[in-house]
Image (cartoon, rainbow, N blue to C red):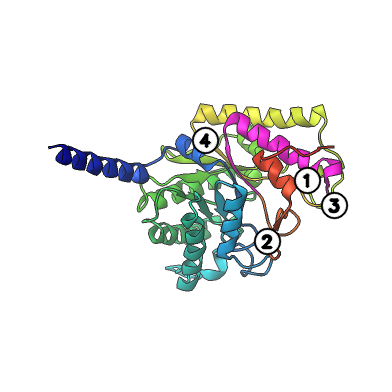
Amino acid sequence: QVCILQSLCAIMWVLLLAGAVDAVLSPAEMQMRLGIGINLGNTLEAPHEGAWAPSAQSRFFDAYRQQGFQNVRVPVRWDAHTEQVPPYTVNASWMARVEEVIGWSMDKGFPTILNVHHDDWLDDQQAFEARLPRFVAIWEQIATHFQNHDETLLFECFNEPHVMTSEQLAKMTQACVDTIRETNPTRIVMISGLEWDNPRWILANNLSVPDDTQLMLHIHNYDPRPYTKKDPTQHSWGSAADRQALDLWVNKTQIWSKKHGLPVYYGEFGVTHDQTAATGRVAWYRDHREAIQRVGWAAAVWDDCGWFKIYDRATNSWDQPVVDALLGKTEHVLI
């Protein structure tokens, strides 16, 4: 009898573990799991892979894991790999390549975000209606292809819309969510506002949110732009006023998030190498990490192997002071 009870307990434990693995996570639960991650930037969203940065390799994800990042965002451009006429078929070899890279990420245990990125052909007020069916067809194929991946693969509808109208944004977002739901009823989908996903637009406008419980708000912010951009005109960060401005927009966005029930994923932020530790670059990353963690957001730093590089893929080396500031590992002297 004891053996039978032990066997039953073992079976129940296995079933419980299996249920935990397969359980559908709410957006709030997923936000906690995502933590602070990194972008595989300038790679699958380049005009062709290798044009802007080294082609993706599985070892990059080992490096991300060793540093302690908790999620990976994989930007993907689909235009050059999709037919221009119905049924708008995505090239099978490209879909397989995307799946390979996504697999490397997920095999390392990373919650992974897959999106439509730099597909600016849709972000056109005059051509939007004619081009929307192609966008829907792309998402139909993505959603169908990845429908059997576990719930730690998240979909992001569209990166940085900034030309289309708010009405067109609402139509695109609803079409994206509806299309994904045909094959992925519970997968978390990220939606965003205009002005390159900037939260300023969210706070000043009425974002149309689909009636769906498995959504997150996706934002980007590189404020203050005069400081973070290439060839900056602001050459210092770290004053009380700087930190107050950061806290202000973060707090306002968090209030909006709570009011609308959309947990935030801060999917891009960074500073170019035109700034240094002496001008506050490391402090900027530290202050953003502290703000992100204070309100409980998930995030992914922008890393592009270029102006915003923190990981040198060719040499497998890191901008370690920035990584430590991002992940709160150790405190460096911040000027």
Q: State left or right for residue 7 relative to residue 260.
A: left
Q: Name the residue under label 2.
A: 316
Determine contact: label 3, label 2, CB under 8 Å: no
**In this orientation, which residue lies closer to the viewer: 79 or 242?**
242
Name the quadrant containing residue 226.
Answer: top right
Looking at marks 4 and 3 on the same chain, the residue that comes earlier in the sequence is marked by 3
Name the quadrant containing residue 29.
Answer: top left
Task: Check disc 2 and give the amino acid type.
Answer: Asn
Determine contact: label 1, label 4, CB under 8 Å: no
Task: Check disc 1 and give the amino acid type.
Answer: Thr
Determine contact: label 4, label 3, CB under 8 Å: no
Q: Is mark 1 on a helix, strand or loop?
A: helix
Number of other residues with Cα within 10 Å of mark 4, as a class: few under 14, some 14 to 19, many 20 or more: many
Question: What residue is rendered at 80% in x and 28% in y?
Answer: 241
Q: Name the residue under label 3.
A: 231
**In this orientation, which residue lies closer to the viewer: 326 or 134?**
326
Magenta part of the protein: which range?
274-301
What is the distance, in whole Å, between disc 4 and disc 3 at their CAs?
Answer: 34 Å
Q: In this view, does 240 lie above or below 24?
A: above
**In this orientation, which residue lies closer to the viewer: 111 or 207?**
111
Looking at marks 4 and 2 on the same chain, the residue that comes earlier in the sequence is marked by 4
Residue lying at the far left of the rendered structure: 1
Q: Where is residue 151 in the image (x, y as percent from the top left)?
A: 41, 48
Task: Check disc 4 and give the amino acid type.
Answer: Pro
Q: Is mark 2 on a helix, strand or loop?
A: loop
Q: State left or right for residue 333 relative to residue 172.
A: right
- Residue 228 marker: 1
